[in-house]
């Protein structure tokens, strides 16, 4: 059962974890950025959500409203009026902008959740480094890229780290806090307390490929795809096996479809290029074929399974 207990404590009791960070700028208003903006706003922080696309921002505000409604229904089930107030106040703390530089000027923390592309991330952080106040901490939500490499373009390497959330952000309780080679103690501590303040259980990771979760999850999903590719079991049976035999909420092929097969492939290809001697990161012909056919999982309507298009 999904529990919103930790989230609830953040706005409903004086025992909420406090963070010195009050103004958060989230860059990228897609799947992850909208979730990060939501959990920050519901924890009482002032949030600026940035995307290059105003359509994305409008969509993000809508989905945040819906997901806050889900939280309110659960937490304020006996007091709907209080629930409506919670939704309205949380939404009221989120402002949207299309200019990252403008948004960074008043930020205590910038969390970047834009496309998983080193060049694009470099361009953004270089720009932000020139305009953000000197105390502002920069963090990336990257799934698979090196934090040190992303940080290489900024001067404030001591104030740079990784904050890796999980999808769906409002539900998944873990936050991986990644210390880069030059992340200083104050930045690390501030990231840990901020993570707790938005209701997450934080773990500390080094800047190694995939940190902890994806270093284990990516090979696991890949092995499941290879098992299916060899014809050793059906997709359905592989998923049932891991749900009923290992207690996972989703089977590996369902999860691959949920995350996106293009994302799976992108991560695998990047690591294979960087670590060609690691057989776990070898390309998978079936994955390549599905992606080349546009079968990307839930978002395209088909992957290992077929889905109704929304
Ligand atoms: C090669 C590999 C590549 C890896 C890629 C890595 C990607 C990345 O870096 C890491 C990840 O994120 S890895 C991925 C990590 N992620 C995983 O591994 C996910 C594994 N899956 C799960 O944990 C569950 O299947 C879900 C939580 C997704 C759905 O839960 P369910 O029980 O099957 O279905 P349910 O009954 O519908 O929902 C239950 C409750 O959740 C609520 N809710 C749902 N969606 C929501 C949303 N978007 N917003 C807000 N709330 C949402 C819903 O309202 C309900 O609340 P209630 O108050 O109880 O009524
Ligand atoms: N999807 C996941 O399950 C997941 C989980 C954890 C981490 N991540 C990581 O989070 C990041 C974002 O992933 P996502 O799934 O939310 O992607 P997404 O495609 O849903 O959203 C990315 C958004 O960034 C915007 N964008 C691109 N360049 C920009 C720029 N220069 N300035 C402002 N906005 C810009 C795009 O318009 C898009 O809306 C990636 O680094 C990804 O690896 C993803």
Image (cartoon, grey):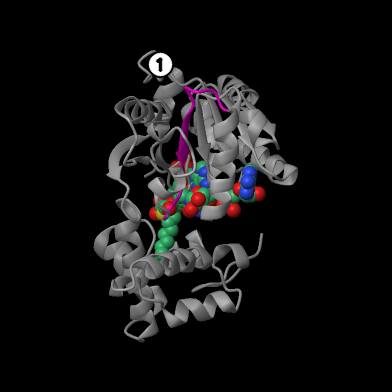
Q: Residue at x 55, y 74 (%)?
A: 291
Q: Is residue 137 magenta?
A: yes
Residue lying farthest to the left in this orientation: 245
> Quarter-wise, where is residue 283 in the image?
bottom left
Q: Is residue 34 visible?
A: no
Q: Position of residue 68 (x, y in %)?
A: 56, 33
Quadrant of the snapshot with the N terminus: top left
**28 to 200, vertically: above or below:** below
> Quarter-wise, where is residue 268 in the image?
bottom left
As helix, strand or loop, the secondary structure at mark 1 comes to loop
Please provide the residue range marked out in magenta: 132-144
Q: Is residue 211 visible?
A: yes
Q: Residue at x 66, y 37 (%)?
A: 61
Q: Residue at x 61, y 68 (%)?
A: 301
Residue lying farthest to the top in this orientation: 14
In the rendered structure, the answer to whether residue 300 lies left or right of residue 116 reads right
In the rendered structure, the answer to whether residue 208 lies left or right of residue 301 reads left
Q: Residue at x 51, y 54 (%)?
A: 118
Mark 1 CB near ligand 1 (8 Å cut): no
Q: Which residue is mark 1?
A: 13
5 vs 296, nearest the viewer: 296
């Amino acid at each position: 059962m999904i529990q919103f207990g930790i989230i609830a404590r953040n706005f409903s009791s004086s025992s909420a974890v406090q963070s010195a960070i009050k103004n958060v700028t989230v860059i990228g208003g897609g799947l992850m950025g909208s979730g990060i903006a939501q959990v920050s706003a519901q924890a009482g922080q002032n949030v600026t959500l940035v995307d290059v696309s105003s359509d994305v921002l409008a969509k993000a505000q809508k989905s945040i409203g819906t997901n806050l409604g889900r939280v309110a229904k659960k937490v304020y089930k006996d007091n709907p009026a209080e629930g409506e107030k919670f939704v309205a106040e949380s939404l009221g703390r989120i402002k949207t902008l299309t200019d990252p530089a403008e948004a960074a000027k008043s930020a205590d923390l910038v969390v970047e959740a834009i496309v998983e592309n080193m060049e694009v991330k470099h361009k953004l952080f270089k720009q932000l480094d020139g305009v953000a106040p000197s105390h502002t901490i920069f963090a990336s939500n990257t799934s698979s890229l090196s934090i040190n490499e992303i940080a290489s373009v900024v001067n404030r390497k001591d104030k740079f780290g990784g904050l890796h959330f999980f999808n769906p952000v409002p539900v998944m309780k873990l936050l991986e806090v990644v210390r880069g080679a030059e992340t200083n103690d104050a930045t690390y501590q501030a990231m840990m307390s901020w993570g707790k303040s938005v209701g997450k259980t934080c773990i500390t990771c080094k800047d190694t490929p995939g940190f902890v979760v994806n270093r284990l999850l990516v090979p696991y999903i890949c092995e499941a795809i290879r098992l299916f590719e060899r014809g050793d079991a059906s997709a359905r049976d592989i998923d049932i096996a891991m749900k009923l035999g290992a207690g996972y909420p989703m089977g590996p092929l369902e999860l691959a479809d949920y995350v996106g097969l293009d994302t799976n492939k992108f991560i695998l290809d990047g690591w294979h290029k960087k670590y060609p001697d690691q057989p776990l990161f070898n390309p998978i012909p079936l994955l390549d074929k599905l992606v080349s056919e546009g079968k990307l999982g839930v978002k395209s309507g088909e992957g290992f399974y077929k889905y109704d298009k929304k």
